[in-house]
Image (tube, rainbow, N blue to C red):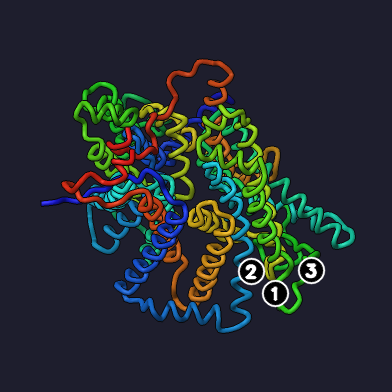
């Protein structure tokens, strides 16, 4: 009688691992569909309605692109930190603070549009990195785990934005109670579209820059080395603490810029309690799915953004936003299990000793 | 006269902080049980939601008449979620951070979905006040400390002391700590790492679920979406602040609860120092999270500067999957 057991592979193929992660996510979605079927919802109809909502019209495609901008920005931020095995779960808060600072500049500074928009972007970059400064310093110099410190600040940012929208920056002219004044400036429109601005180009540019940094620069190599083995990197003479600080501040800045870009989306030129709309967590899932690969983030982010958009459309047809949360949870579990699956293989106990064992 | 006023204010703050912190105490003790055997469950937010929604379902839909039975049902539901988590991270050795976040997200989604038709419904079966101390202490102090429902005493006294005793005074507890610190050594002396990790993840999840059940059976007592509102994350922070010690965790959680009820009290009484009343309320609503953040940063900073802080390090094998082949 032979039994099976898991055996660890000595070398993990990163390409194979990317495949198993995606497979894990797809299996998780199939499970989600099955659960929906079992609870009396027609998941095939949901799927086709969703596809129709996206591909049925230009509006659908633009809707996906609009959702993709904030999701890609937070996902790129998280992916950058993942390269160093750092978990920035506070990208939602940094996103909000970026928007908060950009809005502050936008409603208080008068000047030529392009100049104010540049100032807004700078303010967002600074605010996003300031929001992660304390967790970054604590992680780099005091070895305090960043997961909980970054996350706690999300709640603070959400409260601050609610405060601004009800209190000190409230739009007193409109009848809406929970919303700030509107920014009078907007990024230039993309030709040939109804609702898109040049904001759509930003995540792609950032992804390319990050891709280049990790492919061809020393600093990118150092970050990957720290991610692989921080102690070995320190022995090799890399200043690990400084790199941690740098990377964490950059992730905050990227997420913050995402918050500023979102101010150009139609209907979102002011801040209110619903502004963040779970972009931070969604971006986290994308980054986990892509495993820190920047081009993978672009593909995965667009995919998740279409799910997000389809979910928003289907919400009006009775699919609740909570179910989407549940599906996110399933996908993330699938990704985690898939990542593990590539590291192990099933061997029959009692057979000849496996080849990898012999090789070692 | 002024002194009496301050004393009254302090006592009323404590009397509202105690129930407000109970959820965090329970969730923190739940995390602590799992983390002591090396399993980090970031899904506290989801476990509180699941424990809470099943307690509500038990009372509202299934007509359960005893709060203890409703509590047990909430705990069982959270325990099942904890079992699924444990299978993924202990048996299949998936990343504890990723699966934990998945549980946080999925648990919030599941509980909100299940609670959709029960938003704002009054939960009739509740824990009733259970007076300790009787005539031994006078009015104000009695109100503050000895006039709560029985779960408060369980969470603040019984459970932490029991955990302390088991962890630090029994052989079984020593084995538990060994699994969290050095699983290979524990394995070598015949402690099953897999089973103790699975078992205590499930138990820990059930205790965290009790926190959610307590919310709807006593604190709120209604169901509303996103019931945990960050308390699960605060609980995770409290465990760090407490240096993985059960009795200290109680005080960490009380710190959060005090800040939380400070905000509520300010709102209720229309206090307005420094800001006007609305602005002050908003400022104070950020305070619990800021204070929690400071509470985990300060001991770490003090340790780095050279002040001796007694054993605040995490279990050495926390969040690291164990497999016998890779010692």
Residue bearing the label numbered 3? A188
Q: Are marks 3 and 2 on the same chain?
A: yes
Left or right of A116 on screen, residue B21: left
Q: Are marks 1 and 3 on the same chain?
A: yes
Q: Mark 2 and mark 1 in contact (Cβ < 8 Å)?
A: yes
Q: x%, y% of residue A184?
A: 80, 65
The residue tagged with tag 2: helix, strand or loop? helix
Q: x%, y% of residue A163?
A: 65, 51
Which callout, 1 or 3, points at the residue further toward the start of the chain? 3
Q: Residue at x 52, y 65 (%)?
A: A304
Which callout, 1 or 2, points at the residue further toward the start of the chain? 2
Q: x%, y% of residue B232?
A: 43, 45
- B153 or A108: which is nearer to us? A108
Label number found at residue A322: none
Around disc 3, counting alpha carbons within 10 Å, would you say few (fewer than 14), some (14 to 19), or many (20 or more)?
few
Mark 3 belongs to which subunit? A
Q: Residue at x 48, y 57 (%)?
A: A289
Q: Residue furthest left?
A: A1
**Res B169 visible:** yes
User: Compared with residue A321, is residue B32 higher up or lower down, i.e. above or below?
Assistant: above
Q: x%, y% of residue B258?
A: 50, 35
Left or right of B283 on screen, residue B25: left
Label number found at residue A195: 1
The residue tagged with tag 1: helix, strand or loop? loop
Mark 1 belongs to which subunit? A
- A162 or A47: which is nearer to us? A47
Mark 2 belongs to which subunit? A
Q: Residue at x 30, y 39 (%)?
A: B323
Label number found at residue A66: 2
Using the numbered discs, state the Cα–Cα distance from disc 1 to disc 3 in whole angstroms: 11 Å
């Amino acid at each position: 009688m032979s039994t099976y057991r898991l055996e660890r592979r000595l070398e993990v193929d990163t390409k194979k691992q990317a495949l198993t992660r995606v497979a894990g996510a797809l299996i998780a979605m199939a499970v989600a569909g099955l659960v929906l079927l079992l609870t009396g919802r027609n998941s095939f109809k949901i799927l086709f309605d969703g596809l129709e909502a996206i591909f049925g019209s230009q509006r659908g495609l633009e809707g996906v692109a609009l959702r993709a901008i904030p999701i890609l920005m937070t996902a790129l931020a998280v992916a950058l930190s993942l390269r160093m095995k750092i978990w920035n779960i506070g990208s939602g808060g940094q996103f909000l603070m970026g928007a908060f600072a950009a809005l502050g500049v936008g409603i208080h500074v008068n000047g030529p549009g392009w100049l104010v928009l540049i100032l807004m972007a700078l303010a967002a970059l600074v605010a996003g990195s300031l929001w992660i400064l304390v967790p970054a310093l604590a992680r780099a110099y005091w070895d305090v785990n960043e997961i909980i410190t970054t996350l706690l600040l999300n709640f603070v940012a959400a409260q601050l934005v609610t405060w601004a929208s009800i209190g000190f920056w409230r739009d007193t002219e409109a009848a809406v109670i929970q919303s700030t004044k509107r920014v009078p400036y907007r990024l230039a429109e993309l030709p040939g579209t109804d609702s898109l601005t040049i904001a759509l180009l930003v995540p792609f540019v950032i992804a390319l820059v990050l891709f280049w940094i990790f492919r061809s620069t020393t600093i990118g190599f150092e970050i990957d080395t720290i991610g692989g083995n921080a102690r070995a990197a320190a022995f090799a003479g890399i200043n690990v603490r400084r790199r941690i600080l740098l990377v964490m501040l950059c992730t905050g800045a990227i997420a913050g810029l995402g918050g500023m870009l979102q101010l150009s989306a139609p209907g979102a030129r002011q801040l209110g309690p619903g502004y963040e709309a779970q972009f931070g967590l969604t971006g986290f899932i994308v980054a986990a799915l892509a495993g820190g690969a920047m081009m993978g983030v672009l593909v995965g982010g667009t995919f998740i953004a279409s799910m997000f958009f389809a979910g928003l459309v289907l919400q009006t047809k009775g699919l609740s936003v909570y179910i989407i949360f549940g599906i996110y949870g399933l996908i993330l579990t699938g990704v985690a299990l898939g990542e593990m699956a590539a590291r192990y293989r099933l061997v029959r106990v009692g057979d000849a000793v496996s080849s990898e064992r012999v090789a070692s | 006269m002024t002194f009496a006023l301050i004393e009254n204010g302090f006592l009323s703050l404590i009397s509202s902080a105690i129930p407000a912190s109970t959820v965090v105490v329970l969730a923190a003790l739940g995390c602590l049980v799992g983390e002591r055997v090396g399993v980090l469950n970031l899904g506290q937010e989801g476990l509180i939601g699941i424990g809470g929604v099943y307690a509500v379902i038990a009372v509202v839909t299934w007509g359960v008449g005893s709060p203890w039975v409703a509590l047990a049902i909430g705990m069982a539901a959270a325990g099942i979620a904890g079992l699924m988590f444990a299978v993924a991270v202990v048996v299949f050795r998936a990343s504890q951070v990723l699966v934990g976040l998945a549980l946080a997200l999925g648990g919030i989604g599941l509980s909100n979905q299940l609670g959709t038709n029960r938003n704002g419904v009054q939960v009739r079966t509740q824990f009733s006040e259970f007076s300790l101390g009787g005539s031994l202490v006078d009015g104000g102090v009695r109100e503050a400390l000895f006039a709560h429902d029985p779960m408060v005493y369980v969470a603040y006294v019984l459970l932490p002391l029991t955990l302390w005793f088991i962890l630090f005074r029994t052989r079984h507890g020593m084995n538990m700590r060994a699994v969290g610190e050095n699983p290979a050594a524990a394995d070598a002396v015949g402690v099953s790492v897999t089973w103790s990790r699975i078992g205590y993840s499930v138990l820990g999840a059930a205790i965290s679920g009790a926190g959610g059940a307590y919310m709807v059976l006593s604190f709120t007592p209604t169901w509303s979406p996103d019931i945990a509102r960050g308390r699960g994350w605060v609980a995770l922070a409290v465990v760090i602040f407490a240096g993985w010690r059960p009795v200290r965790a109680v005080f960490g959680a009380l710190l959060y609860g005090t800040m939380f009820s400070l905000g509520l009290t300010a709102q209720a009484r229309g206090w307005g120092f420094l800001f006007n009343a609305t602005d002050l309320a908003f400022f104070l609503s950020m305070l619990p999270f800021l204070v929690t953040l400071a509470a985990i940063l300060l001991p770490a900073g003090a340790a780095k500067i050279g002040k001796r802080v007694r054993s605040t390090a995490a279990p050495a094998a926390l969040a690291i999957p164990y497999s016998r082949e890779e010692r």
